[in-house]
């Protein structure tokens, strides 16, 4: 399963007068800390995009607030017990799996066209094309055939027996009647897709709302989908405003320009804590522990960072416990690997790199950086150990963390230069195309027991040749990790899978393709008149259940 990028940035704050005023409770205005680089559901992975599309689209399957896999656009979740899933052998002798789904009878695109198996077949065609830019690559490669029974029933044939065979949340359905023309030239699809050139086309959306207005960098307006077959949502329209500076986001909330702040991508923990203390009578603040993994991706093509001794020394030089205590009141546990302690597959004995300046110094020396010159480590040729640390601009807390990291690394003799960018540049170009020279700080948002193939498997390194698909931005290449990921995916026995998960975490903690920081708690700031918002703590946003949101009756 692909992961979602999480960050905040500074671009534009608009005044309350720039949008029509809310009349009664017909309009809900939500503030988020980032504007999505794209509204296409499968070409990039920003949480901001996922949050907006949660209002306007429905996937086949998702994990709910109880961390259980459930159907959304299908009528029943296939299992081996109910006969809708069955093992099979592929024509080339591989152990495969056939999984059958039925599309809900009331599923309609917002232009009135019925969601059908034509869309299912078309989406696979787009996903399997090597230049479409659609992710995740392995999901589409493994899906070798589709059998169509009628306009609602279909069977997917995979060339592997995945333990999560009935999780097809990656199957982000594309409307064939709208997108076929855009896909006529597959290599140009990322720029020709109607999500990019005609994002208010009603035929792109099948959820409770459809996108009615897009103001890049500013806001997205959504209105009710007249063809939505589920419960009628409470609000006539929803405005999602991108206020990509956390201080301005809070100010807009207090002024009434927005009604709530999304927990998935909103205020920092310290801001929310202070706001609750001052304005708890107006707003309910929910602190939700989550699977959000804050870390620093390392570009392993950088020869200095290619040395695992340098990577380990960099981590040993950091006092992450002190940072989480001082900045987050201990609410965000230090990460020892990429798997959260909340995940059922978390290994209890994974290696911990505790703050140890002496051990860090010894490793730097062993790697050839033992001599100090003007307070900075240099190699035998006198070249300084200098790295660049990048993240998105505008997140007050993340920028403070950068300064603390810079200071702690300076004490260890590492010269760290800070260079930040707006989120749309940082994620749309720098990270996704591996253009960061050394370090990129951001977060991954994942689902329960989500196999990190897209971020760690060597086949998932984005390149121009594969249309920059894949999320292995570090360029990590490790045959043992590849084999472990592949074994996890096809191990149906949970006990055996747990052993493999422990191995994966051990490799990660030893090799450190990224520097683990902590797992975040997300603060949801809600008006006291709003009911029904249930934080999930994983990558599927609260907006997927927007039809359950209601105005509280006095």
Image (cartoon, rainbow, N blue to C red):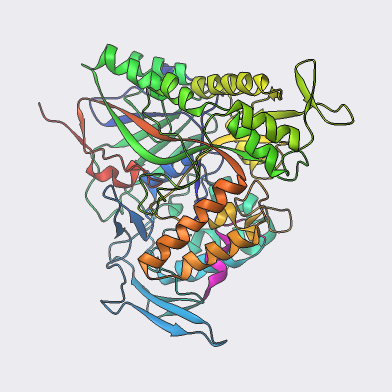
The residue that appears at 58% across and 57% down in the rendered structure is: 134
The residue that appears at 63% across and 54% down in the rendered structure is: 469
Please say if 267 is above or below 209.
Answer: above
Residue 550, given in percent of the width and then of the height, sits at: 20, 37
* Position of the C terminus by quadrant: top left
Left or right of 421: which side holds 64?
left
Question: Is 140 one of the magenta-colored residues?
Answer: yes
Left or right of 345: which side holds 415?
right
Left or right of 366: which side holds 70?
left
Question: Is 521 one of the magenta-colored residues?
Answer: no
Which region of the structure is painted magenta?
131-144
Determine which quarter of the picture holds residue 241. top left
Please say if 118 is above or below 354.
Answer: below
Residue closer to the observer: 420 or 147: 420
Residue sitting at the far left: 554
Residue closer to the observer: 19 or 476: 476
The residue that appears at 79% across and 15% down in the rendered structure is: 374
The residue that appears at 30% across and 67% down in the rendered structure is: 77
State whether residue 153 appears in this view.
Answer: no
Residue 63, given in percent of the width and then of the height, sits at: 33, 53
Residue sitting at the far right: 381
Residue closer to the observer: 276 or 468: 276
Residue 398, given in percent of the width and then of the height, sits at: 52, 25
Residue 524, given in percent of the width and then of the height, sits at: 32, 30
């Amino acid at each position: 399963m692909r992961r979602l990028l999480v960050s905040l940035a500074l671009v534009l704050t608009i005044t309350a007068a720039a949008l029509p005023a809310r009349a009664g409770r017909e309009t809900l205005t939500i503030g988020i800390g980032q504007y999505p680089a794209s509204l296409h559901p499968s070409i990039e992975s920003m949480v901001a995009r996922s949050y907006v599309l949660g209002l306007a689209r429905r996937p086949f399957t998702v994990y709910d607030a109880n961390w259980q896999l459930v159907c959304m656009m299908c009528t029943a979740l296939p299992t081996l017990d109910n006969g809708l899933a069955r093992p099979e052998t592929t024509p080339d002798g591989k152990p495969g799996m056939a999984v059958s789904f039925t599309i809900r009878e009331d599923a309609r695109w917002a232009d009135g066209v019925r969601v059908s198996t034509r869309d299912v077949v078309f989406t696979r065609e787009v996903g399997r094309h090597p230049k479409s830019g659609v992710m995740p690559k392995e999901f589409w490669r493994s899906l070798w055939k589709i059998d169509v029974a009628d306009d609602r029933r279909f069977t997917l044939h995979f060339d592997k027996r995945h333990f999560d065979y009935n999780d097809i949340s990656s199957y982000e359905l594309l409307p064939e009647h709208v997108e076929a023309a855009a896909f006529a030239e597959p290599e140009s699809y990322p720029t020709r897709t109607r999500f990019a050139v005609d994002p208010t086309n009603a035929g792109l959306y099948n959820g409770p709302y459809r996108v009615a207005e897009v103001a890049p960098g500013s806001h997205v307006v959504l209105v009710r989908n007249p063809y939505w077959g589920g419960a009628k949502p409470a609000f006539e329209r929803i405005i999602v405003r991108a206020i990509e500076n956390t201080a301005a986001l809070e100010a807009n909330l207090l002024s009434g320009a927005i009604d709530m702040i999304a927990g998935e991508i909103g205020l920092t923990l310290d801001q929310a804590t202070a706001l609750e203390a001052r304005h708890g009578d107006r707003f309910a603040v929910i602190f939700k522990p989550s699977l959000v993994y804050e870390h620093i991706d390392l570009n392993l093509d950088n020869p200095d960072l290619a040395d695992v001794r340098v990577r380990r020394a960099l981590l040993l030089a950091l006092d992450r416990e002190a940072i989480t205590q001082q900045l987050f009141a201990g609410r965000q546990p230090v990460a020892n690997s990429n798997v959260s302690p909340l995940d059922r597959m978390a290994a209890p004995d994974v290696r911990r790199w505790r703050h140890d300046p002496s051990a860090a110094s010894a490793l730097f020396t062993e790697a050839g950086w033992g001599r100090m010159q003007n307070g900075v480590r240099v190699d035998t040729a006198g070249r300084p150990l200098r790295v660049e640390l990048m993240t998105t601009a505008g997140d007050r807390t993340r920028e403070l963390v950068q300064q603390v990291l810079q200071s702690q690394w300076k004490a260890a003799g590492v010269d760290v230069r800070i260079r930040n960018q707006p989120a749309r540049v940082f994620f749309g170009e720098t990270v996704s195309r591996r253009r960061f020279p050394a370090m990129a700080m951001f977060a991954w948002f994942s689902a329960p027991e989500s196999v990190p193939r897209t971020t760690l498997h060597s086949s998932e390194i984005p390149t121009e040749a594969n249309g920059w698909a894949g999320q292995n931005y570090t360029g990590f290449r490790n045959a043992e990790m590849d084999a472990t990921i592949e074994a996890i995916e096809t191990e149906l026995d949970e006990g055996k899978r747990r052993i493999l998960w422990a191995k994966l975490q051990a490799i990660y903690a030893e090799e450190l393709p990224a520097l683990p920081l902590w797992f975040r708690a997300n603060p949801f700031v809600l008006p006291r008149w709003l009911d029904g918002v249930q934080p999930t703590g994983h990558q599927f946003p609260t907006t997927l259940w927007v039809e359950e949101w209601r105005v509280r009756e006095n």
